[in-house]
């Protein structure tokens, strides 16, 4: 008896300090992340300042944030901050669900690859062989040309309709066929060919919506149930659903916010397209999704075989980082698979490393939080030593000439993008889907903190009198050019 008591004491004295040490280290890391948010830019001749997450939420007017961190192939912590609904003072917790927006495309792609792996559908067959209850309109771009599921997943199908606006909860919600055909009450363009399949990358939420139609026609079931059975349930993603709208019993969801902290009428917009934008989830569930892919890449037993996962994360075009439902980027000696999301009132992102078992998920219920998301991701990358991930550019700011501020103000458009340049207390502000200050580096060139590698350049008109041309340039490539509306 005495021997057993001594043995028990030895076990306790060995085990408990180790547990306390692990918990202490975790709390220290969380504190480091919470107080280590960097701007994403280092200003010349000054030290890099770090910020507190609550302060930055208040600065960007973001009501709540949900985070999950993956390290060494495990979810090591999840945490939520702020209010999921400001009016009711409802606090967000780790079980609060958010609209994940285009992260839905990655879950959709995973489901498709699983079905391909099982031999139930083909990535290379013409999609017309699967379509039974809707017909893709013929055009000069698509007639006698094969369009495949691989094209749709990689945004190389030549189809248009980039994204969707959503519907008020009180609106009449269109059917899937009405959405695809652009028929009222649908508020989006018809899904049709605007380029030859395989010619180039063009982000097409319409193409992803067509995948939903293909799956429903092929398997004679509704999309929500199919994804639930093939992905969400097997991965134990218990707080995830493609139900649009949410079931009435669901009350732990984050209401979406737009503009200056204005809540969306009814709490959120309905996105009935589902496949490109319909997933509700929490950060922990998306982290489970990351882990499943990481295990597949190691060849461990999971839903996707290693070969299938590698196929899913392989580039389709050498000029694009988009694979079959994911973005894959090289960061020093590591590769990361990721996707961002932007629905009305919500922003989101996830990253997963392909070798080192690291990852991050950030979900927010505001359109103002793109920069906050970047700061959180970079803080996690710094705290958990993601080598080569965070490499901030160094910028030297220049005082902006008031005459230049006056000259560049106005509305700009190129037929697709529309935005306004205004004077915000002596600084230039660009207003599109959201508002952001431009930072001047001289020679009528600016940058955005949310995208510091992109230059915003103003040019004079042909007569040389005023600035009426704006260009967004990255690595010498013009991403966008627009003219002032005179």
Image (cartoon, grey):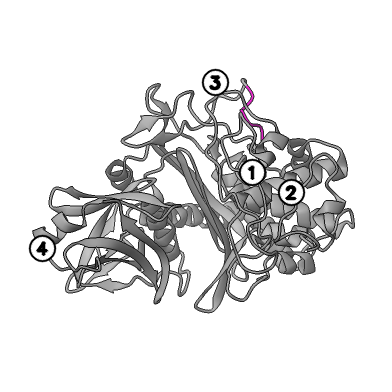
Q: Which residues are magenta?
A: 241-247
Q: Earlier in the sequence, mark 3 or mark 4?
A: 3
**Of callouts 4 and 1, the N-terminal one:** 1
* Secondary structure at numbered mark 2: loop
Whether residue 69 is visible, yes or no, is no
Q: Residues within 10 Å of mark 2 (few under 14, many from 20)?
A: few
Q: Main secondary structure of the magenta part?
A: loop
Which element type, helix, strand or loop, lies under badge 3?
A: loop
Q: Earlier in the sequence, mark 2 or mark 4?
A: 2
State the SS at label 4: loop
User: Residue beneath label 1, please?
Assistant: 190
Distance of mark 3 from mark 1, alpha carbons? Answer: 23 Å
10 Å neighbourhood of mark 4: few (<14), some, or many (≥20)?
A: few
Q: Position of residue 169 (x, y in %)?
A: 55, 24
The disc, 3 or 1, on the residue closer to the chain's N-terminal end is 3
Query: Which residue in the structure is indicated by mark 2?
Result: 137
Residue closest to the eye, 310 or 161: 161
Lower position in the chain sequence, tag 2 or tag 3: 2
Residue 170 disc label: 3
Residue farthest toward the front in the current orientation of the protein: 463
Marks 4 and 1, how far apart at CA: 46 Å
Task: Look at the picture and state if 318 lies above or below 103.
Answer: below
Considering only order in the chain, which callout, 2 or 1, is on the residue closer to the N terminus? 2
């Amino acid at each position: 008896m005495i021997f057993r008591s001594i043995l028990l004491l030895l076990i306790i004295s060995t085990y408990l300090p180790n547990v306390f040490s692990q918990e202490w280290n975790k709390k220290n890391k969380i504190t480091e992340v919470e107080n280590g948010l960097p701007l994403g830019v280092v200003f010349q001749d000054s030290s890099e300042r770090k910020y507190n997450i609550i302060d930055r939420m208040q600065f960007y007017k973001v009501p709540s944030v949900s985070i999950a961190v993956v390290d060494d192939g495990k979810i090591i912590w999840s945490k939520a901050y702020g209010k999921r609904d400001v009016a009711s003072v409802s606090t967000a917790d780790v079980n609060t669900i958010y609209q994940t927006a285009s992260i839905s495309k990655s879950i959709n792609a995973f489901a498709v690859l699983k079905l391909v792996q099982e031999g139930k559908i083909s990535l290379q067959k013409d999609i017309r062989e699967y379509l039974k209850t809707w017909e893709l309109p013929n055009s000069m771009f698509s007639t006698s040309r094969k369009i495949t599921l691989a094209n749709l997943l990689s945004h190389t199908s030549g189809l248009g309709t980039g994204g969707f606006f959503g519907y008020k909860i009180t609106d009449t919600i269109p059917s899937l066929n009405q959405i695809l055909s652009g028929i009222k009450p649908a508020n989006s363009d018809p899904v049709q060919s605007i380029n030859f399949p395989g010619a180039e990358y063009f982000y097409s939420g319409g193409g992803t919506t067509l995948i939903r139609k293909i799956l429903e026609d092929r398997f004679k079931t509704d999309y929500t149930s199919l994804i639930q059975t093939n992905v969400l349930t097997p991965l134990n993603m218990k707080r995830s659903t493609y139900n649009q709208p949410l079931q009435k019993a669901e009350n732990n969801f984050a209401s979406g916010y737009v503009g200056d902290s204005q809540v969306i009428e009814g709490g959120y917009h309905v996105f009935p397209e589902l496949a490109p934008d319909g997933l509700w989830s929490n950060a922990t569930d998306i982290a489970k999704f990351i882990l499943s892919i990481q295990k597949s890449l190691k060849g461990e037993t999971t839903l996707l075989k290693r070969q299938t996962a590698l196929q899913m994360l392989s580039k389709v075009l050498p000029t694009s980082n988009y694979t079959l439902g994911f973005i894959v980027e090289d960061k020093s000696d590591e590769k990361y698979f990721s996707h961002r999301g932007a629905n009305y009132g919500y922003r989101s992102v996830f990253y997963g490393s392909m070798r080192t078992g690291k990852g991050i998920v950030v979900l927010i219920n505001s359109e103002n939080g793109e920069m906050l998301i970047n700061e959180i991701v970079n803080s996690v990358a710094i705290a958990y030593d993601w080598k080569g991930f965070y490499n901030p550019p160094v910028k030297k700011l220049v005082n902006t000439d008031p005459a230049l501020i006056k000259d560049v103000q106005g509305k700009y458009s190129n037929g697709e993008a529309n935005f306004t340049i205004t004077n915000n207390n002596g600084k230039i502000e660009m207003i599109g889907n959201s508002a952001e200050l431009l930072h001047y580096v001289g020679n009528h060139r600016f940058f955005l903190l949310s995208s510091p590698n992109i230059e915003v350049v103003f040019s004079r008109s042909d007569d040389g009198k005023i600035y009426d041309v704006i260009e967004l340039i990255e690595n010498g490539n013009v991403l966008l050019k627009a003219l002032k509306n005179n």
